[in-house]
Image (spheres, rainbow, N blue to C red):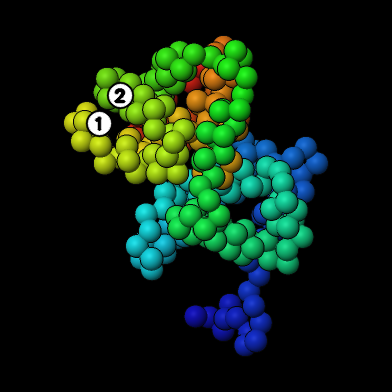
Amino acid sequence: MDARTRPCPGKTTPDPRNDLLRAALQARTGLDWSSTRGIDLYHRIEREMAGPISRELQRSYGLAVDSWDLVHTAVESLAAGSILRYVQGAEKPWAYLYAVLRQSALDQAWGLNGPCLDSLADDLATAPESHLTPMPTVVDLTVDTVLRHAPRLDSRGVLDTVWFYADVAPDRASRSRTLAASDEALLRRLEADEIRAIGNIALGGRATATPTSLFAGYLVDETWIPEDSDIHQSALRKFARRLDSTPLLIGA
């Protein structure tokens, strides 16, 4: 290493990701994930936070934690709430967010704080029944959305998988992806990763399920268009990329 670029003993090299994170969170109009800075931050979280955490938990604890879920949790955490305030006030915001995301993944994997997806079941169970879209309609709308963004998937397999999540999630929400991905009937038409990916889209992210769930959106309003929601559009694009499909964007 050139002496001019070698770090001085006792000094810590500043992490540019801290500046990127601070700048993104200090934007007067809020964090815009479609901006150059927002896209850069998203990809850094994906590559340098979610990926390493997922690999570490698999290597050290034998835990299969989906890096997509970690990215989604980070995005939601930076949107609002107490975590956002703590990240903004941290001396090293990147390291703080990394630690929070890692601990959250451990808690969810081991059930230390209770399964967050169960909150979706609670929310739906307490909603006025007369105001909800019938479940068969919710399933059909969810299947249509999945196939718009992943047209190469087996349509019958998608239908069976979405119905599986609709039937199982209210009682065993926290384990539904694992149960679905090991179901022999579903595996005849889809791969396990495809089944889990559909669960991510149908049920939403683990951190706060209801705001990111296709089920929840369609239950409240059958005319709802998920592509009109920035966070759902982001999730659907990620879903399509993950399955190596070509997304069909509304209005394109």
Residue at (45, 13) in percent of width and height: 137
- Amino acid residing under circle 1: Leu
- Amino acid residing under circle 2: Asp
Q: Would you call the spot at circle 2 few (<14 residues within 10 Å), some (14-19), or many (20 or more)? A: some
Residue at (45, 39) in percent of width and height: 173
Label drawn at residue 228: none
Residue 173, above or below 135: below
Q: CA distance from mark 2 to mark 1?
A: 7 Å
Residue 138, above or below 36: above
**Callout 2 touching callout 1 (CB < 8 Å):** yes
Point out residue 168 in the picture as x, y percentages from the top left corner.
39, 33
Residue located beneath label 2 in the image: 160
Residue at (62, 35) in percent of width and height: 34
Question: Which element type, helix, strand or loop, lies under badge 1?
Answer: helix
Closer to us: 74 or 38: 74
Residue at (57, 34) in percent of width and height: 122
Residue located beneath label 1 in the image: 186
Query: Is residue 58 in sight in this rendering?
Result: yes
